[in-house]
Image (cartoon, grey):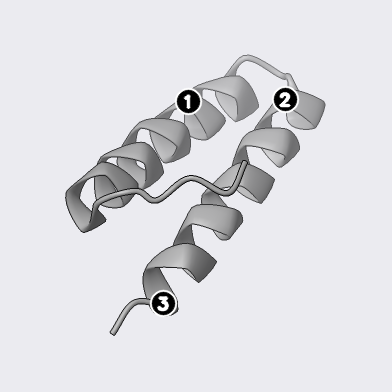
Amino acid sequence: MSQAHSVNDIRTAIRELSARADLARKEGRPGDAAELEKRVDGYREELAARP
């Protein structure tokens, strides 16, 4: 899982996963939403670590 992502790819992933998490919450799937948010947090950390 140690793959280099471009900044644009990271931002796109954050946007897409956040939208999916919102949908999961609206559909009453809090477990799925939590997993997606966890992945978003990982991408945000990766983005924050960039120079």
Q: Position of residue 45 (x, y in %)?
A: 52, 69
Q: Report the amino acid beneath label 2.
A: Asp
Query: Observer-nearest residue: 6 or 20?
Result: 6
Q: What element carries label 1?
A: helix
Q: Give the CA separation, mark 3 to mark 1.
A: 22 Å
Residue at the image point whose x is 26% and y is 43% from the top: 9
Element carrying mark 2: helix
Query: Toward which corner of the image does residue 47 lie, by quadrant?
Result: bottom left
Q: Left of 41 or right of it: where is 3?
A: left
Which amino acid lies under the numbered mark 1 shown in the image of this protein?
Answer: Arg
> Label 1 belongs to which residue?
20
The residue that disc 3 covers is 48
2 or 1: tag closer to the N-terminus: 1
Name the residue furthest right: 31
How far from the left and from the top, in percent, is residue 19? 40, 32
- Residue at the (72%, 25%) spot, across then down: 32
**Residue in the picture at 32% in, 41% down:** 15
Is residue 3 depicted above or below 48 in this figure? Answer: above
Local packing at callout 1 (Cα closer than 10 Å; few below 14, some 14-19, many 20+) is some
Q: Is residue 9 left or right of residue 17?
A: left
Residue 5: x %, y % from top left: 34, 48
Q: For the C terminus, give its image quadrant.
A: bottom left
Image point 41% across, 77% down: which residue?
48
Q: In this view, does 22 lie above or below 48?
A: above
Q: Give the residue number, with chain letter if any, for mark 2.
A: 32
Q: What residue type is labelled 3?
A: Ala
Nearest to N terminus: mark 3 or mark 1? 1
Of residue 6 and residue 40, the one placed in the foreground of this image is 6
**10 Å neighbourhood of mark 2: few (<14), some, or many (≥20)?**
some
Q: Is residue 36 left or right of residue 11?
A: right
Distance of label 2 from label 1 (alpha carbons): 9 Å
